[in-house]
Amino acid sequence: MEKENSKIYFVTKNSHKFSEVSFMFQNENVEFDLLHSDLDTIEIQATLCRDVALYKLKSIREKLDYSFFIEDSGFYVDNPLNGFPGVYSSYVYKTIGNEGILKLIDDFEN
C-alpha cells in the first residue's frame, strides 16, 4: 500500500473520540495513518442513529475528496426509559446532564 493511499481522516469535533480511535489504531497495528479533521458537519435530529449518520456522511462527502470515516452513537436506557435518550443523548446531556437522566430513572421502581 502506497503511503499516500494509507491516510484516512476521522471527522469529529470531539478530541476525546479522536484520541480513543487513535489509540485503537496504534494497538491494532492498522496500516493507515489516522488524521484528524474537525470539519463542521451537519447533524440532523432524527429518531434513528442510522439516519443521522447517513445524512452526516453525505454532507461531508460533498466537501472532501479524501478517505474519511465518522462515528455516531446514542445512549439507550431500555428499562425504565424505553430507549430514551437514544439518538438525542448529546442534546440531553447538554440540557439536563447525567443527573437529569438519573432523576428520571429514580421516578420508577424495578
Image (spheres, rainbow, N blue to C red):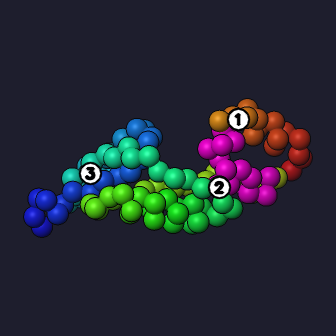
Of labels 3 and 2, earlier in sequence is 3
Rounded to the nearest angstrom, the CA distance separating label 1 from label 2 is 15 Å
The magenta segment is 81-93
- The residue most toward the top is 99
Residue 36 at what x, y percent from top left?
31, 45
Q: Amino acid at mark 1?
A: Thr
| Residue 28 seen | no
Pick the front one: 31 or 60: 60
Q: Categorize mark 2 by other alpha carbons within 10 Å: few (<14), some (14-19), many (20+).
A: few
According to the picture, the residue beneath numbered tag 2 turns out to be 45
Q: Residue at x 75, y 40 (%)?
A: 101
Marks 3 and 1 close (CB-CB < 8 Å):
no
Residue 23 is one of the magenta-drawn residues:
no
Q: Which mark is residue 95?
A: 1
Sequence-wise, the earlier of marks 3 and 1 is 3
Residue 13 place in picture, x, y as percent: 44, 42
Give the number of callouts.
Answer: 3
The image shows residue 50 at horizontal and vertical percentages of 57, 66
Which residue is identified by label 3?
Answer: 34
